[in-house]
Image: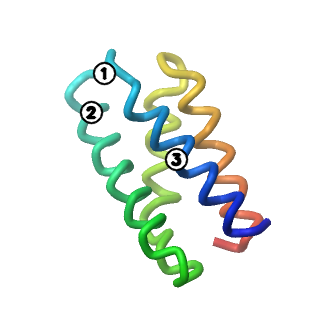
Amino acid sequence: MDDQKLRSQLEQLHTELGQLNTLDQVETGLLQELSGDIQEALRRGDERGQQYGGLVENLREAVARLEASHSNAALLMRQVIDELAYMGI
């Protein structure tokens, strides 16, 4: 998988997260942290692997939390998790 495809998926996920509006306080905090992780990963694009530090774990937690209420966002998160796993991260 090339980094450009992953960056595109992260940008799409970031956009989707910004459009979620029916969140409770815990979900809001989780997604704010995840959004920050995504922005940091996109900013540090040349340091392959390191920029994804806590992103995978935060994605897994968010998927578990949002799967029923926000299925599209959860699907995008799963795709990013799969791509990072494919890259060995």
Q: Give, as a three-letter code, the residue at label 2.
A: Thr
Residue to which mark 2 is pinned: 28
Q: Are marks 1 and 2 in contact (CB under 8 Å)?
A: yes
Q: Amino acid at mark 3?
A: Arg
The residues tagged by marks 1 and 2 sit, at their Cα atoms, a distance apart of 6 Å
Mark closer to the chain start, 3 or 2:
2
Q: Residues within 10 Å of mark 1 (few under 14, many from 20)?
A: few
Q: Residue at x 54, y 82 (%)?
A: 46
For label 2, the SS is: helix
Identify the mark at residue 23; answer none if there is no mark.
1
Q: Which residue is mark 3?
A: 60
Is residue 68 shown above or below 88?
above
Tell me the amino acid under the disc marked 1: Leu
Question: Foreground mark, 3 or 2?
Answer: 2
Disc number lying in front (3 or 1): 1
- The residue lying toward the viewer, choosing from 84 and 17, is 17
The residue shown at (57%, 78%) is 49
Question: Which residue appears at 28% of the width and 44% of the height?
Answer: 32
The N terminus: image quadrant: bottom right
**Residue 5 falls left or right of residue 47:** right
Q: CA distance from mark 3 to mark 2?
A: 15 Å
